[in-house]
Image (tube, rainbow, N blue to C red):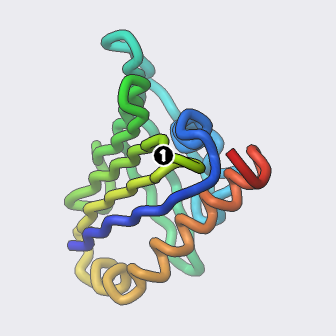
Amino acid sequence: MAQFHLERVLPYAASDLWDMVSDVKRYPEFIPWITALRAYNASSPSDGVHMFDADVSVGYKMLSERFSTRVTRRADDLSLHMGLLRGPLRKLNGHWHFTEIDGGTRVDFDMDMDFKNPILNAMLKANLNLAVSRLMSVFEARAKQLYGHKA
């Protein structure tokens, strides 16, 4: 099992960052290891809450996997949660939260995941810091591309 928490302060509006991270369908455009993504079963169970399921195909070097998640976007607290529906994982819970602060936004990202395959789990644990840093760098680069250099 791998768990991590990452916190960053970025010079962009919280609502812009939430919009960017919530636009899951665009992930294959800027996250290199997401090779395909299909969103379906969209619903809005209450005002400001939007849910959908997503099939995600990932690939890295010789490995490729596919998994399905349920994504919940909440406009009231600028958060996004994803939870595992099916795939090669025992567990996958991810949570983004965006808080407006002076000069930008505090971004909190939590992930808790566990592969069914012990070899994949060992590889994840061995490369966790690199993977998390790379993921955040990809999102930071996307924010810079979309919103420029400042809030």
Residue lying at 63% horizontally and 46% vertically, measured from the top left? 12
Image position, residue 131 (x, y; %): 48, 76
Task: From the image, tell me which residue sits under label 1.
Answer: 101
Relative vertical location of residue 41 with respect to residue 102 in this rendering, above or below: above
| Camera-side residue of 72 and 149 | 149
Quarter of the image for residue 80 reads top left
Relative vertical location of residue 65 with respect to residue 95 in this rendering, above or below: below
Image position, residue 79 (x, y; %): 39, 37
| Camera-side residue of 39 and 64 | 39
Observer able to see residue 38: no
Q: Quadrant of the C terminus?
A: top right
Query: Secondary structure beneath disc 1?
Result: strand
Q: In the current view of this chain or complex, which residue is farthest to the bottom? A: 126
Tally of numbered tags: 1
Relative vertical location of residue 99 with respect to residue 78 in this rendering, above or below: below
Q: Tell me: 125 left or right of 58.
A: left
Residue lying at 28% horizontally and 78% vertically, measured from the top left? 121
Relative vertical location of residue 76 with respect to residue 70 in this rendering, above or below: above
Observer able to see residue 33: yes
Image position, residue 72 (x, y; %): 36, 32
Q: Tell me: 26 left or right of 6.
A: right
Q: Quadrant of the N terminus?
A: bottom left
Query: Crowding at label 1, few (<14), some or many (≥20) Cα neighbours within 10 Å?
Result: some
Image position, residue 67 (x, y; %): 39, 52
| Camera-side residue of 101 and 107 | 101
Residue lying at 29% horizontally and 45% vertically, measured from the top left? 83
Residue lying at 59% horizontally and 65% vertically, measured from the top left? 33
Amino acid bearing label 1? Ile
